[in-house]
Image: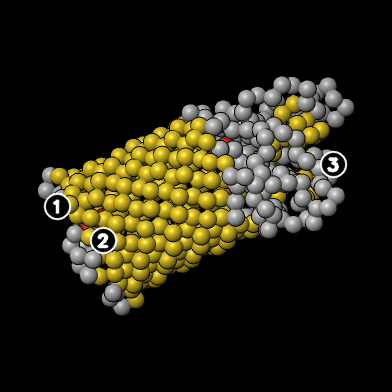
Amino acid sequence: MTAALLGPAAGRAADSSTIDSSLLIYSETNRVKLAEGVFDLNRVVNEQRTIGVRLTLDALTGATPNGATPSSHAQTFTGPSGGASYAAQPGEIPLDNTFTDQRIALDARLVESLDRVTFLNVGGHLSFEHDYTSLGLNGGLKRDFNRRNTTLGLTLSYNHDIVSPIGGAPEPFSTMQPPSSDGDGEGEDEGGESGPGRGKDVVDAVFSATQVLGRNTLVRANYSFNRSSGYLTDPYKILSVVQDATGTEPGEPVAYVYEARPGARRTQSVFGEVRRFVSGSVLDLSYRYFWDDWGIKSNTADVFLRLPLGGGHSLEPHVRWYHQNAADFHAWYLLDGQAYPAHASADARLAEFTGYTYGLQYLMPIGTDAGFRVSAEYYTQNGARSPPDAVGILGQYDLFPTLDVFMLRIGYSHDF
């Protein structure tokens, strides 16, 4: 039963190929929409060498929170160039509805067998967006021990990214520009000129271990380390500067400033997984603990079950739970008249929240060499409605409204 635990990729014949394609539709309620297509070709050249290439195409559109707080008055915002504007009605979470982007990414890989139990893999990555370019290299070594019941691996990767925000990267805590008189309302990512590029370097290391415990049980564990340095700020996120409790309208914004994040980040995580073959089904339990030097700690638990239906068909339900605390510098707003901190961001992704994912996948064989799969997932994310010390009118608003996401993925694979 070990082959079933390891997955369908094991044991491909020499001089054979596999094509795997998929389409993902991602939809946040009243927010971001994504369509992503993936085409993956894997070629087993001989017993010693396997090569592969993956092409990914993304298209995003919709509205995303810009970081500002709600107000009892209508609000108007612009991008860094001041040429595009959008509005938020009284009481609404401000959403940037000029958000749109397209991405093309190409990944290539080579796996070489150095001997019967040692495998070397190398790869490269290149992706382009209108305001973002990424170039990366990776390599790893994997070795089997103990009659191939134990596998140890080490993978290293390096990415150099260039962020070229529309209108240029704003200075930390600089004030958002008012709409320009000649602005044409064009979306920030819909033809606006990118500004000078700002670099970011990312280094990853992953140490992994896999152990077969008899015919029916497999355990895995890994430790990951990541260091990012350079331009880590989101150039399109802002913070509201609001009146303090002594103002005429406490909690109402008087200005908007661009966020500022540290120029370096170290993250670490440990991951453990147990797969067990039970009465014809495969049960998968996993847990991940993450921490970084921005103050974020998170826990993720995932339960997955593969239920055979006969004839190669199967159903795969899963449930995932995620929780993180807020970054040290996360702030929903800044107070007028007080000195700004060294770093601050109102990005909800850096706030404390809990997320739940519920999914179901169906797999269907097509003949002996092909397969079809379809999966649906529902994700819901909840955070604190507002901080307990919210100033003035901000105590009446939900600063972290529930986020609901629906995902549909359709895939097809073929061996030849």
Crowdedness near tag 1: few (<14), some (14–19) or many (≥20) residues, C-alpha within 10 Å: few
In the image, what residue type sits under mark 3?
His
Is residue 60 something that shows in the picture?
Answer: yes
| Identity, as a three-letter code, of the amino acid under mark 1 | Asp
Q: Is residue 134 above or below residue 374?
A: above
Q: Nearer the viewer, mark 1 or mark 3?
A: 1
- Residue that label 2 marks: 50
Dot 2 and dot 1 residues touching (CB under 8 Å): no
Question: Real-space Cα distance between discs 2 and 1?
Answer: 14 Å
Task: Tell me if residue 372 comes above or below residue 176 in the rendering.
Answer: below
Render colour scheme:
secondary structure
- Residue drawn at x 38%, y 53% is 124
Give the side of residue 165 with respect to residue 357, left or right. Answer: right
Tell me how far mark 1 sits from mark 3, CA to CA: 69 Å
Q: Which residue is mark 3?
A: 73
Q: Secondary structure at mark 2?
A: strand
| Residue at figure coordinates x 52%, y 36% from the top left | 230
Q: Is residue 301 visible?
A: no
Q: Which of the 4 quarters of the picture holds residue 225?
A: top left
Mark number displayed over residue 132: none
Labelled pair 1, 3 in contact (Cβ < 8 Å):
no
Looking at marks 2 and 3 on the same chain, the residue that comes earlier in the sequence is marked by 2
Residue under the point 45% across and 50% down: 135
Pick the quarter of the image with the C terminus. Answer: bottom left
Give percent across and percent down for residue 117: 15, 50
Q: Under tag 1, what secondary structure?
A: strand
Q: Which residue is mark 1?
A: 115
**Percent coordinates x, y for residue 66 in the rendering:** 68, 44
Total labels drawn: 3
The residue lying furthest to the right in this view is: 248
